[in-house]
Structure formats: structure tokens, C-alpha cells
Amino acid sequence: MATERASGDLTVIPGVSAIAAPRRSRPGRLLVMARRKPLGAVSAVIIGVMVLTAVFAPLLAPYDPTTTHPRDKLQGPSATYKLGTDDLGRDVLSRIIVGARTSLWAGVAATTFGTLLGGLIGMVSGYAGGRTDMAIQRVMDSIQALPLIVLLLVVVVALGPSMWNIIWALSLGILPAACRIVRSATLAIKTEPYVEAARVVGAWPVRIVFQHILPNVSAPIIVVASVTIGGAILAEASLSFLGLGVPPPNPSWGGMLAASGRRYFEREPTLALFPGLAITITVLAFNLLGDTLRDVLDPRLRGR
């Protein structure tokens, strides 16, 4: 009777020639993933374009976004000004391009700080348990007790409107959600046999958290971050709309909606239309990419 012998990824049966299954290259796997998740692929392309636009904004902007042209104020889209001008004669296209840097930087930086700090606190809370866990969660409850926009207003008004103050305020609002998600994942992982074995042999808690728990909660952290960036960009635009964002004359999408976009909407609707479209497309792209990453990284959803 023929016996089977495992050889690598194949099962070799004597007398039967094994045919190795071709392995796809990384570009091939990305292409297959793009075909399975077309919305995620389109969202990734849009986000890539937005990031490149923000990085090379000074080179792509046709005019200085802060330079005024009084003779050309409130003009509609034309060959000279592709998206028109505002009430001070500033080029709308240039301000949208440079404003992408403000919105993306605020969203990415706030999400990075809030998610990493919240994830670290969540791992400590979930692994420690007991009174430490209870104390940390009560602090998270107190932060979440205030609506996000109210919390942002309180922090920014107390610290003053500036880019870094907005980032710290947004990070504080992101922190509780990231903490709770990572804590729940940590509670499930710390009972696994390999964690129990590390504890039995005398491994330090810090080593267990960073060597055994962190790699296994990285997927939820990535998903939370990708979904949260869109909300952070929208929150920054809301603060700028209320006059608590980046101080003028620095352009921001929310500030464009609040200034000329609100005052001259009936005369030139494009002043509010184009910044609003930029916010909508960017936030939607990040949300769709977050959903795609969740489907890919969550083992329970990979087959769907």
C-alpha cells in the first residue's frame, strides 16, 4: 500500500508525480485582491492621489493660495482660474490643493497618535485586569461622556486654535474607541495557551504584551485607524467651519466652506461645492478602504 510523505506544502505519494501549484507574486496577489474588492481598490487609488497632492501641493498649485487678486474676485470657473476665485480673488483650486495638506495631516496625525496610545492603554487594561482595568475604563467612560464635537470645542478653546492643538484634541476623542477595541481583543488573546506558557516560564508582563499580544491585535488596530481617519478629517473640517481650525490665511477645506462659501453661496455656489466635494470624496474613500481592510484582515470575513 502506498504511503504518503509530506514535502513542504505538497503531499507526495510514491509513484505519483507531484505538480506544484504556482505561487502568485505580490503584484499578482494585489491584482486578485483588487478584483475581489473593487471599491477598496478605487478608494486606495483616490487616497494615493490625495496623498501625492498634499505632498507636492506647492508644485501642483497654479497660484499662491494666499495671494489676493481683487480685480478677479468671485469669478466662476474659467481657463485662467479652473475652479474660480473667492471673495478676495484667491484661486479656489490652489486653496483646495494646499488645503489637502492641512486636512490629511490633521487626520493622519491625530489618528496615529490616538490609535497607538489608545491601543497601548487597551492592551495594558486588558492584560492587567482587576482594579487597573476598572480604573482605566472609568477614565475612558468619562471621556466618552461628552459628545465628540463638544469635547473638541472645549479642548481647542482652552488651548487656542492651531494645527497641533487640533491634532491633540482629535487624538483625545479617538483614544477611547481604540482602547476599548484593543482591550476586547487582548482579553481574548491573554487566555491562549502560548500566553499562559509564557507567563508560566516567568516572562515579564511587558515582554508578553509586546511580543505575544501586540502582533495579534495589530489587525484590529489597523482597521480602527483606517476607519477613523475619515472621521478625523471630517471633525477637523467641522472645527475649521466653526472658526476654530487652522488660523487664516492658511487654507483648509472647512475654512473655505465657512468663509466665502457660506457668504456668497447664492451668487457662486461653486465656492462651497468644490471644498465640500473634496471632503466628501476623501472621507468616503477612507471609510471604504477601512471596510475593505476589515474584510481582508478579519478571518471571519475573508470568505465573504
Image (cartoon, rainbow, N blue to C red):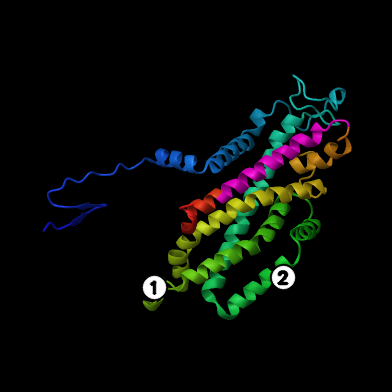
In the structure shown, which secondary structural element does the residue marked by tag 1 occupy? helix
- Is residue 71 placed above or below 36 in the rendered structure? above
At x 48%, y 59%, the residue is 300
Distance (Cα) linking label 1 and label 2: 35 Å
Q: Is the residue marked by circle 2 packed among few (<14), some (14-19), or many (20+) residues within 10 Å?
A: few
Q: Callout 2, which amino acid?
A: Ser
Task: Tell me the chief SS of the magenta region.
Answer: helix
Q: Is the residue marked by circle 1 packed among few (<14), some (14-19), or many (20+) residues within 10 Å?
A: few
Question: Residue 242: percent from the left, percent from the top?
Answer: 82, 49
> The N terminus is located in which quarter?
bottom left
Residue identifier under label 2? 142
Question: Residue 235: percent from the left, percent from the top?
Answer: 73, 51
At x 87%, y 22%, the residue is 71
Q: Is residue 269 magenta?
A: yes
At x 80%, y 40%, the residue is 257
Q: Nearer the viewer, residue 156 or 138?
A: 138
Question: Residue 36: percent from the left, percent from the top?
Answer: 48, 43
Q: Which residues are magenta?
A: 267-291
Residue identifier under label 1? 193
Q: Is residue 158 magenta?
A: no
Asked whether, in this view, residue 142 is left or right of residue 7, the answer is right
At x 73%, y 54%, the residue is 165
Q: Callout 1, which amino acid?
A: Pro
Q: Quadrant of residue 150?
A: bottom right
